[in-house]
Amino acid sequence: MPLQKPWRDLDRSTVSSAPDRPGVYELGDSSGTVLAVESGVLRDELKTALAYGDGDQVRWTETHTLERAREIASEHRDRLE
């Protein structure tokens, strides 16, 4: 099941509005196909994704800890396989 959040364009504005907190994020192409599910400190992770052109869109959810973010990301990756 995908994250229940709307897609946002992966651009500088979106990255600057991302929280500086742990979370899970999905990168998608322009048609909304999920390319990757990752976790970490959201703003830092999205800066890297933007710099490397890893996707066209992004959506995320915050978590309280990095450990919980990793658990959720793992669950979501399983559904992509």
Image: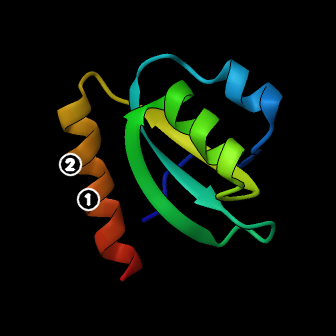
**Quadrant where the image shows the C terminus:** bottom left
**Count of picture labels:** 2
Q: Secondary structure at mark 2?
A: helix
Q: Which mark is residue 64?
A: none
Q: Residue at x 51, y 36 (%)?
A: 45
Q: Residues within 10 Å of mark 2 (few under 14, many from 20)?
A: few
Which percent across, then down, holds residue 17? 69, 20
Q: Residue at x 26, y 61 (%)?
A: 75
Amino acid found under the numbered disc labelled 2: Glu
Q: Quadrant of residue 9?
A: top right
Q: Which mark is residue 74?
A: 1
Q: Residue at x 72, y 55 (%)?
A: 53
The image shows residue 4, relative to residue 22, as above or below, that is: below
* Labelled pair 1, 2 in contact (Cβ < 8 Å): yes
The image shows residue 42, relative to residue 38, as above or below, that is: above
Q: Residue at x 29, y 39 (%)?
A: 69
Q: For this view, does 47 lie left or right of residue 16?
A: left
Instruction: Provide the residue designation for mark 2.
Output: 71
Which percent across, then down, holds residue 22? 37, 26
3D distance between C-alphas at marks 1 and 2: 5 Å
Q: Residues within 10 Å of mark 1 (few under 14, many from 20)?
A: some
Q: For this view, does 59 lie left or right of residue 3?
A: right
Which percent across, then down, holds residue 34? 58, 68
In this view, which residue lies farthest toward the front?
52
Which percent across, then down, holds residue 2? 48, 61
Front residue of this view, candidates 14 and 76: 14
Amino acid found under the numbered disc labelled 1: Ser
In this view, which residue lies farthest toward the bottom?
81
Q: For this view, does 54 lie left or right of residue 13?
A: left
